[in-house]
Image (tube, rainbow, N blue to C red):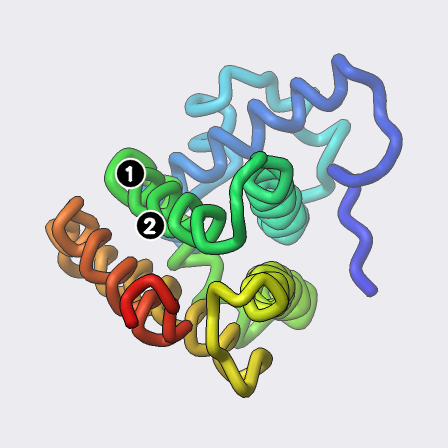
Amino acid sequence: MVMDKSARMISPTARKTRQRIFDGAMECIGQNGYEKTTIDDIIFASGVSKGSIYYHFKDKGEIFRELTGFILAEHRERLDQVRQLDVGPWEKICCTIVRVFEKLRWGGARFVAGMELASLAQRNPAIHEIQVLVNDLYQQFFSRLISEGNERGEFMVEDVEKTSYLLYALLDGVFLRSIVQPEYASKAHCQFIIESAKKLLRFKAEE
């Protein structure tokens, strides 16, 4: 199991510094790609000194390996926020879909960077492992909500695991397509995905 430093116990000051470095790295990789991004680019984008960067990370590769762990933590926090809402499983699924589309519309370089990191997963085992964890995180999240919806009589899903996989695949497909066609992250497409999810879950309100 990969354990990123961003998840370890570090001081609040160090945590803020690392977040600035990660934010700068995301901006750079979103604009220039991984191969063309240099430490000097990250220094300029983050406003953190070279000495401070090398205090926290030994090289560019380590920054991006740990950046994937930072992204995983962001996804966990985002889903935890939805999980704590005082609404039913269908509303939580809709909320998750809407938030993904909002991030796509306003995320800019961060989502291009996410695409770049996903491509690196094919060559880097550590990044690949984090990518798998993100996928599993969403599928388990949807699986729990679908099971809850079945128990409450809202959904009529026979194969919960397969359906949670398909639901996540819908969102993953939106992410990939919006990188090439930013207009795909529109509110109209968001509503289309919600309607598709409703049919996939055989939402009883429609019957």
Place of residue 202 in the rendered image (x, y in percent of width and height, measured from the top left): 37, 75
Asked where in the image residue 176 lies, by quadrant, the reply is: bottom left
Q: Residue at x 15, y 47 (%)?
A: 186
Position of 161 with respect to 6 (left or right) is: left
Q: Is residue 63 visible?
A: no
Position of 186 with respect to 204 (left or right) is: left
Give, as a three-letter code, the residue at label 2.
Val
Q: CA distance from mark 2 to mark 1?
A: 7 Å
Place of residue 194 in the rendered image (x, y in percent of width and height, measured from the top left): 29, 58
In this view, 29 is above or below 43? below
Q: Which residue is mark 2?
A: 112
Foreground residue, 20 or 53?
Answer: 20
Q: Residue at x 83, y 65 (%)?
A: 1
Q: Which circle marks residue 61 in the picture? A: none
Give, as a three-letter code, the residue at label 1.
Gly
Question: Pointer 2: residues within 10 angstroms few (<14), some, or many (20+)?
Answer: many
Place of residue 150 in the rendered image (x, y in percent of width and height, measured from the top left): 57, 70
Q: Which residue is mark 1?
A: 108
Place of residue 159 in the rendered image (x, y in percent of width and height, measured from the top left): 55, 86
Question: Pointer 1: residues within 10 angstroms few (<14), some, or many (20+)?
Answer: some
Asked where in the image residue 44 lies, by quadrant, the reply is: top left
Q: Residue at x 39, y 35 (%)?
A: 27
Quarter the C terminus occupies: bottom left
Position of 112 with respect to 143 (left or right) is: left
Q: Residue at x 43, y 24 (%)?
A: 45
Asked where in the image residue 53 lies, by quadrant, the reply is: top right
